[in-house]
Each structure stands twice: as C-alpha cells, then as structure tokens.
Image (cartoon, rainbow, N blue to C red):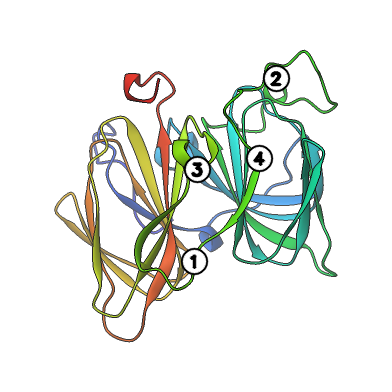
Amino acid sequence: MRTRNRDLAGMKTIPTVIRAADLAAYAPANHTGTSNVRVIGPETVGATALEVLVGTIVKSHGAHPHLEQCAYMIEGTGESQAQGRVEVMGPGTWTYVPAGVFHSFRVTSDRPGRLLVVYAPPYGENPAHTIMDPDDAVAVPADGKVRVLAADGAATGTVPLIDRRTVGARWVDIAAVRLPEGGAVSCATEPDAEQVLYLEEGRIDVRADERDLRLAPGDFLFLPRGISADLRCPGGGQASGFLIKGWVPSSTSRQ
C-alpha cells in the first residue's frame, strides 16, 4: 500500500491510492479455484459502504441475500448464469446481480479469468451472507435485474452503466470514465456514498482533499464520504476506467 488512508491520530479517513499488486492474495471461503486480493474494504481503507476485490477465478456459485454483486471481466471469458439465463462475459463487460438472486459463474477460457468484483455493502466472505443452494424462500427485489453490460468505447466523460435507472441497483452505482488527452471530469461530493476510481488504461492526475495524486494502470483511488476529486488526463494519450459508488444502506437518499 503506497499511501496511508488515515492520519497519525487514526481518526480521519483521507483519499487513498492503492495498487492490488502491493497486497497479499488469499483463497476465499465459499468459492473454488479462486485467489482474491481485497483492495477496498474495512481493513484496507476503512470502507463501510462497499468492498472491491481483484480475483483470479475458475468457477463459483451462490447468492448473497444482504448485498449486491457486480463483476468486471478484466481478462479471459466466462459465463454468468442467473434467473434461467446464461450470458457470455468477455473482457470489458460487467455483470450485475441483485441481492438474493442465486447465480453461478464459470470461466470458459483456457486460462483462469481475472475479474474485478464489487460488493455493496461489504461482504468479507461471511458464510452467513452466502446461500450455496437455490432457496425459493429468499426474497428477491422485484425491481432488480440481472444484467451483463459493456461500456460504449466511443463515449467520453462519465457514462452510467449500473445504477437504479438501468438495473434497479439499490446500493451501488458504476459508471465508465473515458478521458481524452487533456480531458477533465469531477467526482462530486457524496455525503452518503464512498467512491472508488479504478484506472484500467492511461494516466490520471487527481486533486482531492488538497492532495495531489497520480494514478497509473491498475491503481485504485478511494474517496471517503464527503470528499470530492478533480480528475485530469495528462499528455501522452487517453485514460479509461470506472467510477464505483457504494451507498450507505441506511441512507435516506437511496430509499
């Protein structure tokens, strides 16, 4: 971890840049053939509204009645199965699964798939928050829709992908961020949400909480509640990634 997320008094959470390669991998409970790195979570940056992992996965299945799950295919190909549908996931695609929906995922490429996984609220591989066999008694939100989505590569700026309007998400919003050389965009202050920027390609200069930070490919920027950021793509090419928002479950603005 290259930047501490708390001040010396241990009381104030600040913008933090984290690189998955700097963190140790582990084999999570409730999954097979999986190696995860927890990048954003309570133990890494003090996050309370969401959790972000980078996982190398062979196969998995289950459901999470208390949280929403999103996954982005970084490398490899796979199949997402839920609600009687099987959808192909290739590099550059996201899948959204509402709370309580039983789903399975399997890698179809010759090599293990590499995914970015988002849980909102945080999961922490808690067995109490996992259903390993379909259970008709689990209530599934009527407005939630299992979806596989891909960002429009031609669009620039911030492009919504997963939110209440597109899939009925309750606790998570995900938007693609596409900046041309010299382009800029702001992450507005969210008093009821934590924000994570994942940079997939290019470089981004960040100004947040009176701090200057720089993101390289594979870096994550964590913005605590109440912190905004200005993003700029410096010279040398365009930048692309994703802005992930995890809303506090008790937030009145998301009821």
Q: In this view, does 109 lie to the left or right of 150?
A: right
- State the CA–CA distance, disc 3 to disc 1: 15 Å
Q: Where is residue 231 in the image (x, y as percent from the top left)?
A: 26, 63
Asked if residue 40 is positioned above or below residue 185 in the image, the reply reads above
Earlier residue among tags 2 and 1: 2
Q: Can residue 32 be seen in this view?
A: no
Q: Camera-side residue: 153 or 30? A: 153
For image coordinates 59% across by 31% down, the residue present is 144
Q: Which amino acid does label 2 sit on?
A: Ala
In the structure shown, which secondary structural element does the residue marked by tag 1 occupy?
Answer: loop
Residue under circle 2? Answer: 128
Please tell me how crowded label 2 is: few (under 14), some (14-19), or many (20+) other residues with Cα within 10 Å: few
Residue under circle 3? Answer: 166
Q: Where is residue 169 in the image (x, y as percent from the top left)?
A: 51, 34
Q: What residue type is labelled 4?
A: Val
Q: Can residue 192 be seen in this view?
A: yes
